[in-house]
Image (cartoon, coloured by chain):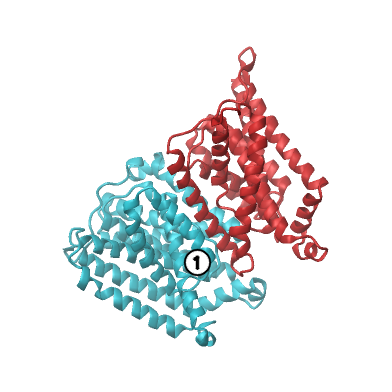
Amino acid sequence: MFIEIIDVIISGLINGSVYALMAVGLTLIYGVSKAFNFAYGSLYSLGGYIAFLLFSLAWINNYLLVFCLAAPILLVIGFFLEKLLVAPLRKRDDWEIKVMMITLGLALFLDNSFQVVFGARMKSLPTMLEGSFELGEFILSYQDVAIFIFSIGGILLFRWFLNNTRTGMSVRAVAQNPEGAQIVGIPKEFVFAATFAISTVMVGMGGILLAQKYFITPTGGWDILVKAWVITAFGGMGSIKGSLYAAFIVGMLEAFVGWHFGMTWTLIALFAVLLTTLAVRPQGLMGKWG
Amino acid sequence: MEHKPIALLLAGIWGIVAILPLFFGSTNFIMHILIMCLIWSVVASCWDLIMGFAGIFSFGQVAFFVIGAYSSAILSAKFGIAPIFAVFCAGGIAAALGILVGLPCLKLKGAYIALVTFAVHMILEPVLKGTIGRALGTGGSRGILTIAPMKIFGFTFSSSNPVPYFYLMLLVAIICSAIIFIVIKSKWGTAFLALKDAEDFASCLGVSSYKYKLMVFALTSFLTGMIGGFYAHYIGMLSTRMLGIDLFVTLMIILVIGGVGKFPGAIIGAFITIAFNEMLSPIGPYRPIILGAMVVMLVLILPDGIVGLVEKLFPKKQHELTH
């Protein structure tokens, strides 16, 4: 019993860390440009498939190399997606709903393209690290530890980027006040595209990290989109700190509900918690209206 | 748009649709597509009313449709209620749930509302398939396989002879579009416009945003649930496959083609999209790819839909076409 609870807590922590990485990406776009990306889940699958393709090349055999190659690919894809699809809509009055529509169309396009190109069967990635750490009945696989370290590392890297680089600071400036940022000479359009690109990298990395545990399927991203969305709304859309807390709360909640009531109840429990939170605090845990 | 051109356009559309069976009445396949066009035109118009006019990003329209379809099927099978009454009860159930969903949305904004309403859509599938659904009689993942056909005054509308059902659906669609038209024209429509343009100012002038938002939730989910019931009794079987993302995006294409917030546009969009969708069906797995690409292209090229394009092509009439 005690060991089981420890197991559940650890699985909650590990899932929570990956959710945090992905939810921060989603909340970043919303916080900076107020755009909502419906194709976020498909970009998660895209990350998985890119890693799958890279691993099928003979000379690639470790994850560090895959991360180093996949990140720039995702960065470029994200940048051009924003420039081609979202940026032209931004000058319209009703651009928010148009962005939701266009990204939903993009999601349908990507999901079914994956299905045609890679087939509907699940794809798996090799495990990052073999073996496990055992202490009596208690087992902790090195793979889980690696996933946890990589996600937390990714978030810390992102935090460093926001606080210490010039681009990161301009991202924060635009998030605080788009007009003001433009007046002092920050290229607003570039910052929008850059945040979209960064968030694409974050969700793609999450896709690579989770694919070794949960496989890659063409439509597997929807679950991730909904979870990331729930987490961002729960934590407050646009609030990075809120998303971090919310991600770990949701990871834990999911682990405990799944363990005690069965996996079918996790989604229902998530929405129940979300609705209660939003009824009391419509802006989420740490969000601001605006 | 002014009201008179909308009314004329509506009359024109329904007039043309009403004589279509003269040409295609003998081909059951085409009549089936036309009935589907009528059904989806009502759903899309309702979605347009709540999203385009009221400015509420509701993503639960398909969910209300499915709720209506299931409730009507269960009411007629389990409680023996005649389908024609079951359909209206289903609308009532959908409206009650619509108000329930609308309540938390009153205090929320933008993407949050989209999430809460989309959540209804996402939860519906596990609920219908799970133990709760099976207890209510949804048949779990198998779905409901036998639904009584629509029957009015002893006349049975069977799916082997679709022309009578087509005219029934046409009547329903005309009534629904008339209701939506009246709503847009009435004080409601003005209130929505005011709330969308300047919510704070409008509420200072005494326009209650809670009241109007709840009313539009109730009305659109009632109409959508009711048309869902008509769908169930026409098709004769239901499964949770309707909740897939495919149908959702198809409905969105209808709105994109017709133009968001350009009322009769959604009806034109429904006819174009459903017919186009059927034409694409031979190419199988490539169809959703093309649909997705179409949404992306259309939003970029034709952001205001067909009605918007017409307004742009005839700018002379601009002063009387805009609000």
Q: Quadrant of the C terminus of chain B?
A: bottom right
Horizontal and vertical percent for residue A153? Answer: 73, 35
In this view, the residue in front, A81 or B321, is A81
Indicate left or right for B98 with A140 as reference: left
- Outermost residue, top side: A136
Indicate left or right for A177 with A49 as reference: right
At x 43%, y 43%, the residue is A116
Q: How many marks?
A: 1
At x 69%, y 49%, the residue is A285
Crowding around mark 1 (Cα neighbors within 10 Å: few <14, some 14 to 19, many 20+) is many
In this view, the residue in front, B254 or B111, is B254
Of all chains in the rendering, the one displayed in red is A
In this view, the residue in front, A234 or A107, is A107
Of all chains in the rendering, the one displayed in cyan is B
Which amino acid is tagged 1? Answer: Ile
Indicate left or right for A26 with A164 as reference: left
Q: Is residue A202 above or below residue A89?
A: above
Q: Is residue B207 above or below residue A261?
A: below
- Residue matched to label 1: B50
Horizontal and vertical percent for residue B15? Answer: 30, 78
Q: Is residue B147 above or below residue A73?
A: below
Q: Is residue B93 visible?
A: yes
Horizontal and vertical percent for residue B49? Answer: 48, 69
